[in-house]
Each structure stands twice: as structure tokens, then as C-alpha cells.
Image (cartoon, rainbow, N blue to C red):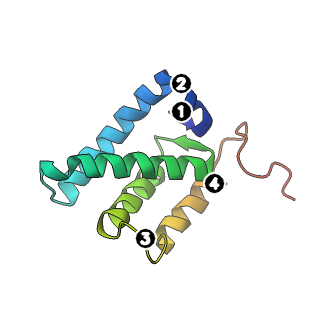
Amino acid sequence: MLINWQAANEGDEVMADNDSFQSDIVTGLMSELNLDDAEKTTITNLVAGATGVVTSSVGVLDESDPIAKLAIKTMVTQQYYDRALENGLSQGVLMMLLHLQANQPEDSDSGDADGS
């Protein structure tokens, strides 16, 4: 499923689908990071924020792209352990965002259409 950041902010139907995507990421991170339920609200909020950052960075978020999910999970993990991101985003996250930007659908309004 493709999610356009602007549409996600305006339409409840898109957000409902997005909630399922985010919920799967939260569940996975809770297990991967071996966190207890007391941290679920924090992880949920970080996932929502990271999803917004990734979506606004790439224009259209393809939820089926494993790199999109990995970028969100990596960003959340970074923010969980370093809330201020004092050293910025990791090179790995930046690389994933560049990859996602380069693989946007042709009909999306993200990026530069004429290459100039």
C-alpha cells in the first residue's frame, strides 16, 4: 500500500491502514528490543513520528517495501536509545531514505521530475 504524507494527514481511511502498518512495527520492535509493556506507549509514539519523518522525506511511503519498514525501525531504535539524536541520524538511515527517494512511483509528486 502506498501512503502519501499529505493524504495521510487528511484522510481517516488512509490513517486506519497506516495504523495497522505501524502496529506491526511496534509489535516487532517490542520483541526485538526485548521491551516490556511499560515501554509500548513510548515505542508507539516513536514509530508514529518515524513513520511521519520517513513519509515526508520520500513523498510516498510504500508499506510493502522492506527498506521502508527497516528505515522506520532503525530510526525508532536510534531515538529510543538517544532521544535527542545528538549525533543526527545514522548513515544507514540516511542511505535507506535515499534509496526510498530514488524508487518513488513515477506518478508521485516527490522529487525532481526533470532531473535539473
Q: Is tag 1's residue or tag 3's residue first in the polypeptide sequence?
A: 1
The residue type indicated by label 4 comes to: Gln
Secondary element at image label 4: helix
Residue 33 image label:
none
The residue type indicated by label 3 comes to: Leu
Residue bearing the label numbered 3? 85
Relative to 11, say whether 84 is above or below: below
Query: For this view, does 34 lie left or right of residue 27?
Result: left
- The quadrant of the rendering that contains the C terminus is bottom right
Tell me where residue 19 sits by quadrant: top left
Few, some or many C-alpha atoms within 10 Å of disc 4 (few <14, some 14-19, many ≥20)? some
Secondary element at image label 3: loop
Residue bearing the label numbered 1? 8
Residue bearing the label numbered 2? 11
Query: For this view, does 26 lie left or right of residue 58?
Result: left
- Residue 58 on image: x %, y %: 61, 50
- Residue 29 on image: x %, y %: 26, 53
The residue type indicated by label 2 comes to: Gly
Camera-near label (1 vs 4) is: 1
Answer yes or no: do the residues labelled 2 and 1 have beta carbons within 8 Å? yes
Is residue 99 or residue 29 the one in the foreground? Answer: 29
Is residue 50 or residue 102 the one in the foreground? Answer: 50
Answer yes or no: do the residues labelled 3 and 2 have beta carbons within 8 Å? no
Tell me where residue 70 sits by quadrant: bottom left
Few, some or many C-alpha atoms within 10 Å of disc 2 (few <14, some 14-19, many ≥20)? few
Residue bearing the label numbered 4? 101
